[in-house]
Amino acid sequence: MPAEPLTGPPRGPSAAEVLAELGALRAADAPTRGGRTFAYVYDAGLDGLDELASAAYTAFATVNGLDPTVFPSVARLENEVVGAVAALLGAPGAQGTFTSGGTESILLAVKTARDHARAERGVTAPQLVIPSTAHAAFHKAAHYLGLEAVVVPVDPVSFRADAAATAAAVTDRTVLVVASAPSYAHGVVDPVAEIAAAAAARGVLCHVDACIGGWLLPHLRRAGRKVEPFDLSVPGVTSLSVDLHKYGYADKGASVVLYRDAELRRHQYFAHAGWPGYPVVNPTVQGTKSGGLLAQAWAVLRYVGEDGYTALARRVADASDRLLAGLRGLGGVRVLGEPAAGLVAFTVLAEGEGAADTGLLLHLADEMRIRGWYLQPQLSFDGLPANLHLTLTPATVDRVDALLADLGDALEAARALPPVTVDPGLVELAAGLDPAALGPQEVAGVLAFAGLDGDGGLPERMAPVLALLDALPGALKERLLAEFIGSVFRI
């Protein structure tokens, strides 16, 4: 019998079989439509919007966004998308770039500030001044780009950044000061005008992280809600990030970073002609990239329109009003701060004490997941309590009453469960460990003890795991989380 030809693998499955496999995999995920997943998902609830975004992506999927001189449609689409953002959030002369998401927008803003300070002020040991509630992407940017992150505690009652403390933290090495509109963790808007003024007084750039609120807050204002100025119209604000895949309802992979002018934006760009290949100029971290994500964002913005976004913002605000009233009416529940833009965080209190009860809160998260809801647990930090985070979208409008009903039942069930406890001896031992000195076997042992070995998936109840993580020192927590993800992606 002749040998098999060495021309490649056997014929693959049919297209229908491949799609069926993907469908089976997708069935195990949290639902992204239907209004029961209150994190990670932004659903306009509009018929036909998903199909439009998919068709627009497909039309431009093979277009290479690397070179707009070869694919001029890329420049046209980007100019129109960024122009729409600048018109809503900018000032005369504002310039920007379409990016793959909020993290890339923030990375580019920090890179721009670092390079601007180096060129204009001679800063060689740059610092980034951020409130403790600033998104982790700023710490990632500092880590990647060689900046020192100077973290300023926030007000423990309002959860807003402290403008006076921020101003006091600025030094001659500061290249960027950050405010959030709103912060992801608690959904509250920082005092942007005060922080920007303090930065400007020292000749320092100020970035507003409006990844969450940049597209929602202006439309909330248009819908009649009170919204304080937070964008490039505020004196001293020099850059801003806004995600279109959040309250712009585009598919994931759509954000814009906006600058006060082109002179500042040029520090974002990378250009290189010192090699024998084609001249390279990259506005973003990515080089080659599909034009599909830009096209679908453009299509969604065009389709929904200003009046449509205003109507959607009004629905979010109405849902938020009902949710907040319902939460505040539940015994033992405390809403954190004054949520302003679709995000809500709340904690639960121990009976008879008035103090936040982390174990009870984590039991509650499990009980809600059993009932088909996903609320995002957030651990305690620097005196700020652990909480459950909810993202409201137009698709949740008809779900709020059902959520509140289940929440009351789940809280009663959680209070009846045995308390979540963490061995004090283990916590004491962990406090003395050097995370960098732990070997692979030691880390694997701790992960297995915590129920995070990566082999059998996550435990059915996450409360004991999260309670342990909550009790561990930050550096050890980060090491274990990184190793856990490494165990999940193990090929």
Image (tube, rainbow, N blue to C red):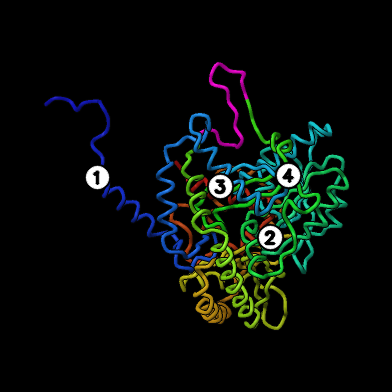
Earlier sequence position, callout 2 versus callout 3: 2
Q: CA distance from mark 3 to mark 1?
A: 37 Å
Do the residues under discs 4 and 2 have CB atoms within 8 angstroms?
no
Foreground mark, 3 or 1, reads 1
Figure check: 431 above or below 399: above
Residue at image mark 4: 260
Residue at image mark 2: 182
Q: CA distance from mark 4 to mark 2?
A: 20 Å
Earlier sequence position, callout 2 versus callout 1: 1
Sort mark 1 into few (<14), some (14-19) or many (20+) by Cα contacts within 10 Å: few
Sort mark 2 into few (<14), some (14-19) or many (20+) by Cα contacts within 10 Å: many
What range is drawn magenta here? 272-288
Question: In the visual, does 39 lie left or right of 160?
Answer: left
Figure check: 41 above or below 223: above
Q: CA distance from mark 2 to mark 1?
A: 47 Å
Q: Quadrant of residue 217?
A: bottom right
Instruction: Tell me which residue sits at (59%, 62%) in the image.
Output: 466
Earlier sequence position, callout 4 versus callout 2: 2
Q: CA distance from mark 4 to mark 3?
A: 40 Å
Question: In the visual, does 410 lie left or right of 131?
Answer: left
Instruction: Tell me which residue sits at (70%, 44%) in the image.
Output: 94
Q: Amino acid at mark 1?
A: Ser
Name the outermost residue toward the top: 276
Q: Amino acid at mark 2?
A: Pro
Residue at image mark 3: 483
Residue at image mark 1: 14
